[in-house]
Amino acid sequence: MTSVVAIGLLLLISLVIGIYGVRAARSASDFLVASRRVSPNWNALAIAGEYLSAASVLGLAGLLLKNGLGTIWYAVGFTAGYVAVVALVAGPMRRSGAYTVPDFAEYRLGAPRLRKLCGCVVLVIMLLYLVPQFKGAGVVLSLVSGTPYWVGVVLAGLVVSGSIAAGGMRSATYVQAFHYVVKLLFIAVPAVYLIAHAGADTRAEVLHPEWGTHFPDTIPVEFAVDTRFTLDEPVTVTDTSGEEVVLGEGSHTVSEGTEYVFPEGAQVPRPEGLPELGGERWSAPLLSQGGYPLFETWSTLLAITFGCMGLPHVIMRFHTSPTARVARRVAVGVIALLGLFYLFPTVYGLLGRVLTPELVLLQGTDTVAVVLPDHTVSGSLGTFLTALVAAGAFGAFLSTSSGLLLALAGGLSHDLFRSSVPRLRLGVAVGACVAVLLALPAQMTDINVLVVWAFTVAASTFCPLLVLGIWWRRLTLPGAATGLIVGAVTATGAVGWSVLLPTPGGWFDVLLAQPAAWTIPLAFATMIAVSRLASPPEWAEHAVLRLHAP
Amino acid sequence: MSNRWLSRILPARRPASSDLRASAELMRQVHALGLDLRDGLHGRGVGTAAKRLRRMLGVDGIVLADLDGSVSSHGRKLSADEVQAVLSQVFEYGGCARTRLSDGAELYACPLTVADELSGALLATGDPAEADVEAAASLVSDCLDHAALRRARARIASANLRTLRAQISPHFVHNALAVISALVRTDPDRARHLLSDFADYLRYGFSEKGDYATVADELEAVQTYLELQRARFHDRLDITVRMAPEVLPVAIPFLVVQPIVENAVRHGLERKEGRGHIGVSGFGEGPLCVIEIEDDGVGMHPDLARSLLAGTGPEAQGVGLANVDQRLRAVYGPEYGLVIETGLGEGTKVTVRIPRFMRGVVAQ
């Protein structure tokens, strides 16, 4: 209940800042202050606030608990993306005057049809990115209020579209900056407390994982879905009727709804396909789900780093900077702020392995950050810490999904169907509805799998478009269009296949699950090859020159 | 949009004869040619236009030339000398000319005239029917004529802007200077500030920099204007400004906010007894930038507001508003005009709603 109150309070404050938190000047002498541009620091805070999504707050800790230390590469990628943005696109994008990627496409290649194509790609990326946000919000809301998952998702959809409709994003910069601070404090304070509270033994175990992980306590586990897991030694568990069941060594299948109580000290069973908690694969510093860790790690890193550049809501934020130099300073600030933040999800993931290993069995690792304080700290302090984390996670959801929904609605109303404001509201409503509907069946999919999907599509479409558009004057309209289509189809299709359909196995699996390493070069190559067939129009030279001339 | 889709999906109610279809296709082609040539012979679409003409006429090659020589060609290539030879023939007699090329192919050239002035030629190689090429040449001439008219329209719009700049009213200059001179003795510091504000205001109003400024620049001009007006109103004017920082760098047409504020002061607040309040607020709305100018002055009848925007209102009032409205529509399209909400005695609220990005709109 405390958590619900905390979330409500956060929502209220965000709304107030969003509607009234615009710099107000009451006398004419304050006028100049109001018309002065926002400082790079505020801007960096706002960008970091918008960027840190549920994937960062919840997903990263959950994936670390489930898949092992290699997950930290995600954090590296999320942060390094800004290096790519600064080095390649931030300054020129600002000079072009383009506000979104479709704007840039129209500026650089001068074709309204390409704008529509870009609008479609924006829709795909935004939806893929919105679904995990809604999933995260649904999980948090259902966890803290005890309602079913779908109620949480629907509620989250209502809350975010309602807050946009009420004008909660009018002063986006201040809302987002506020959300960064909320996220950092609400995640960092409980994390630091948990580290102190955990005691020397737990800390030692966190840092030196032994082979396999054992339950720290007598833990009841209710399986929400059919689960297959393996045991290395026999374990005696108690089922709901109080009878003892001996689970022998080897593989077991447990059907949905079964509840077992595992005794203290028993080894945590290993669900099929996952690395053993604390085992060698878990501790290896690479992402290793498919057996080709080096390729997987590189591919994910490429997807995230270059995908950041193509995320429509990231790029438009650099427009607030008055000069390209300030835009770069802002990006450096963002890198520092993100680096600081990403220390904490790691803490939750590492502590979670020792203190709440049963989440892996429940396939609910995305909730580890919210569950952990409640499990380890008893009494009202635990409730309070849980409320903090829940509010922080909800803030992450709110800021990112408001930005995404606005970008999506803008794409719908502005790029696909040229029209004015009433449609923008309609766009927000439609976008929220679709995202909620898609999030309902996604309960068991990891947040970060979906987020990396969005990043992969962005990296395979907008990254080549922006990089070639800015740095290669021979890019032509047919080249850009074919490259976009090829990139979008291959990236969306490959990950979609691996998430939704059975896969053939082996190398093919890895190529489908982490396609960035081949889809990005493929999109680049297509754009270059098709562009070479024709010569660019004369004015292209001028358009490129203006991107680089100070 | 939906009709076109429907007609593609559903079977046509009445089977169109092939003639009908052919003439519809022809109309589409003619329309597309007009779009290709919308920027004239030196615009972007001239290459596509040459290609389209070649297909429409069914000839081997098309060359579009201006008075200096070929600007675009499609299909069979001609040497510069061959083009020059036939061009000089056409330009000398002002009529169509037929020659035979070295390899025996026929070349037929017709002059393009825009507003009764010779401005180029259309060359067709292969075996062109003379009447067809002449018809095509007159069609291209019409398109070029439209392009010239379009340029003229743009020139008128920028002349309008110049008029607006020149409209910085003599009254205002007089009042400002009078106020400043009255303050020189009693409050020399403020007088000095006001004088420098006035100088800034004039510089902005008279600047020749370009057609677009940032919202921040425009706000500064508003500030200096309001500062001067406040001195004249003996501080019975309250001002509130709320600006979301995201919209400050957005490019907007020069002198859009300032005339609206001026209108609010002159027609809303000057006639009001007691204190007046004027509020300017700006915020982002997805891809749009919204600026609202609100005053609690005497307001006006909605019909009057409507006629002001239509440009049929009384001369003295709201010339500025109609001008701003026209320019916004000209730059951003008909859906982005001014919105005025007002009633007698209820103040006035004017809303400017523009896209944050528009091709070609860049602040200088």
Image (cartoon, coloured by chain):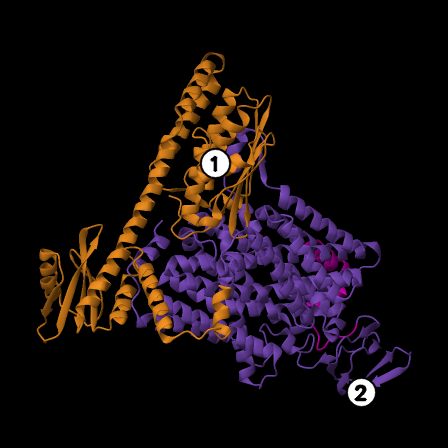
Chain colours: A purple, B orange
B43 in the magenta segment: no
Q: Identity of the amino acid at label 2? A: Gly
Label 2 vs label 1: CA separation?
87 Å
Along the viewing direction, whichever of A240 and B313 lies nearer the viewer: B313
Read off the residue under disc 1: B308
Residue at 60 percent of width and 61 percent of height: A431
Q: Identity of the amino acid at label 1? A: Leu
Say left or right for A353 vs A543. right
Residues in magenta, as a range? A188-215
Residue A509's place in the image compared with A200, above or below, is below
Residue A460's place in the image compared with A410, above or below, is below
A199 in the magenta segment: yes
Across and down, in percent, residue B45 comes to 30, 61
Along the viewing direction, whichever of A372 and B221 lies nearer the viewer: B221
**Residue A321 visible from this viewpoint:** yes
Q: Secondary structure at mark 1?
A: helix
Read off the residue under disc 2: A248
Picture quadrant of residue B244: top right
